[in-house]
Image (cartoon, rainbow, N blue to C red):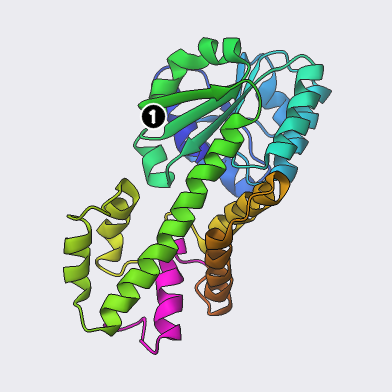
Amino acid sequence: MGLPMAGHLRRAGHAVRAHDPSPERREAAAAAGLEVADTLARALDGAAVAFSSLPNDGALEAVADALAAVRFAGIWVDTSTVSPEASARAAAVATAAGARHVRMTVSGNNHMAEAAQLTLIGSGDRAAWDEVEPLLPLLGPTRFWVGDAEQARLMKLVVNLMIAVTSGMLAEALVLGRKGGLAWEDMWRVLTASAVASPIVKAKSVQLSARDFTPTFTVPQMNKDVDLVLSAGRALGVPLSLVAQVREQMVAAIAQGDAELDYATVIRVLERASGLDPERL
């Protein structure tokens, strides 16, 4: 997600210096025309704004420590999906060292990032958000401000809870119909024209109507987010039985060899459990 966002900023005429601990990702950034720094400290040198897109809580806290070590005094905009608890710890470290921190979670997949069609959800330092706001239309057309602390992190988990549960809902509905003899293509035509045709259902229909499970978001990626959702539920005392069931379906998908497919492969898990062959209609 970070590379296409950086590319949009560069193509708009902004000076962008990128860093990633992976040599392969640094090579990809260079191939995309970005200036690449071999260390995070060099990437931050002289920067007014630092954007980050990170895979997990540990990476977020490591970046916060690195920002503190160089006493980065600019605006840190982090777009990662992480726990509110880790986000609060990272914010405390970075702001104590002089950074101004915006939590800006993004809703959308890699294709939406490439098309600058992400939904941006911000919280934290409102004055810093206002300063970077002119850059944000380069990333997506829709923006929301939701609070002065970790609200953006929780809001992203709320969104991803609904996305995960939608995949489980689709699995049960489609497998019920398929087992009863409905044609796969007919089901998708009806669903996308019906009252249940949410944007995510319509978006998934483009690939899934052709049974294309090429990942926009893999099973382990979604499982990581679902674990964050369940952790938030435990912390807040909210029972989340539906998404917990979807997590078990994703565990089954991994066990059945579908880990690198799209998370919607929970459809295939239920097909197998129902005596249907996922490889042939």
Q: Is residue 193 above or below residue 4?
A: below
Left or right: 193 as drawn, with respect to 23: left
Inspect the magenta stretch and tell me whether residue 277 lies in it.
yes
Q: Residue at x 29, y 84 (%)?
A: 179
Q: Position of residue 4 (x, y in %)?
A: 45, 36
Q: Over which residues does the magenta segment extend? A: 260-281
Q: Is residue 160 above or below residue 101?
A: below
- Point out the image quarter for the C terminus: bottom left
Inspect the magenta stretch and tell me whether residue 38 lies in it.
no
Left or right: 130 as drawn, with respect to 74: left
Amino acid at the residue labelled 1: Gly
Specify the quadrant of the image occupied by residue 9: top left
Specify the quadrant of the image occupied by residue 245: bottom right
Q: Nearer the viewer, residue 158 or 16?
A: 158
Q: Residue at x 63, y 34 (%)?
A: 19
Q: Nearer the viewer, residue 3 or 52?
A: 52
Q: Position of residue 39 (x, y in %)?
A: 72, 32
Q: Position of residue 88 (x, y in %)?
A: 73, 31
Q: Nearer the viewer, residue 150 or 195?
A: 195
Task: Please name the residue that numbered disc 1 is placed on.
Answer: 140
Specify the quadrant of the image occupied by residue 21: top right
Left or right: 114 as drawn, with respect to 252: left
Q: Nearer the viewer, residue 2 or 189?
A: 189
User: Looking at the image, which residue sits at the far bottom?
Assistant: 275
Q: Position of residue 53 (x, y in %)?
A: 58, 37
